[in-house]
Amino acid sequence: MFAGAVVVVWEGMEGAGKTTLMRRVGEILSSRGYRVSYYKTPSETPTGRFAAEFGNKPGTDPLTRMLLFLANTSSDSRIMREKILEEKPRYFFIDRYYLCSITYGMAYARLQGAEVTSEDFLSLVKVVEKLGSKIFLEPDLHVIVDVEEPVRLRRLERRGGGGRLDEELERSTRMQEYVREFYRVFHEWRRGGSMWVENVEGLLDETAGRVAEKILQLETG
């Protein structure tokens, strides 16, 4: 917790319905009288705009891309702290954080042929968390959202696209398999502070209710 706020980080595969689920859970908590605040990365700050623009240009290498997005999550942590102090929410939801930068960066590196193992991934997470122990907000819970691949691809198809690198990676089943693998490694490593959610199509309210109850239990143990 930071300044009385329970910090929940939302992660997952592209097209899994993460943001929609996050907002629905927020509505449930708000209906019970709790104040919920949100923050999304990459943001509209200078580092967020640069990461989104340069990091998603076709041809940007995996390491550069990962470091750009990681820089945004690190830099924006100060803004997140200020937002919590100003708005005084009971729950603070972060739509992708440093874990996303590492997960997608390592997955993209593997897609490009780098011999990146699950052990390499977890080692980098540990190093970044150690280096950022005074910078990052410490999540009370990571909610990792997944969905069946045909559903994921169908949702992405409805979005359309403009040829950006992130859109290409979103539509790559192989890339998302690597993403899923690394998220699974993290989930198993931090099982007590991580919740894996299968966001079954047509069951949004049921799934959101289950996640909301899990979040409410954080304060009771």
Image (tube, rainbow, N blue to C red):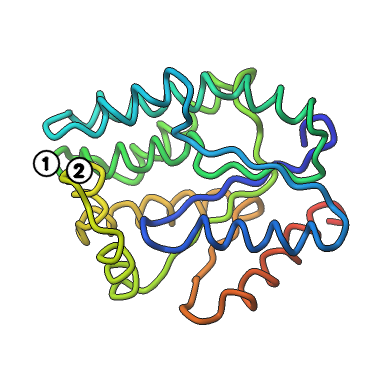
Q: Is residue 20 left or right of residue 42?
A: right
Q: Amino acid at mark 1?
A: Gly
Q: Please give the name of the residue rendered at 44% of the width and 33% of the height, measured from the top-left corner.
A: 42
Specify the label residue 110 is tagged with.
Answer: 2
The image position of residue 45, as x and y in percent, is 48, 22
The image position of residue 107, as x and y in percent, is 27, 45
Rendered image quadrant of residue 110: top left
Whether tag 1 and tag 2 are in contact, CB under 8 A, the answer is: yes
Specify the label residue 88 is tagged with.
Answer: none
Rendered image quadrant of residue 117: top left
The image position of residue 204, as x and y in percent, is 57, 74
The image position of residue 197, as x and y in percent, is 54, 66
Q: Mark 1 to mark 2: distance in Å? A: 5 Å
Residue closest to the eye, 134 or 32:
32
**Rendered view: 103 above or below 207:** above
Q: Please give the name of the residue rendered at 24% of the width and 48% of the height, measured from the top-left corner.
A: 167
Residue denoted by label 1: 113
Q: Amino acid at mark 2?
A: Arg
Residue closest to the eye, 50 or 162:
162
**In which quadrant will I find the C terminus?**
bottom right
Secondary element at image label 2? helix
Q: Is residue 148 left or right of residue 213?
A: left
Q: Please give the name of the residue rendered at 63% of the width and 22% of the height, measured from the top-left corner.
A: 79
Q: Please give the name of the residue rendered at 79% of the width and 26% of the height, measured from the top-left corner.
A: 86
Residue at the extreme bottom: 202
Secondary element at image label 1? loop
Callout 1 crowding tier (Cα within 10 Å): few <14, some 14–19, many ≥20: few
**Rendered view: 152 above or below 185:** below
**Rendered view: 145 above or below 3:** below
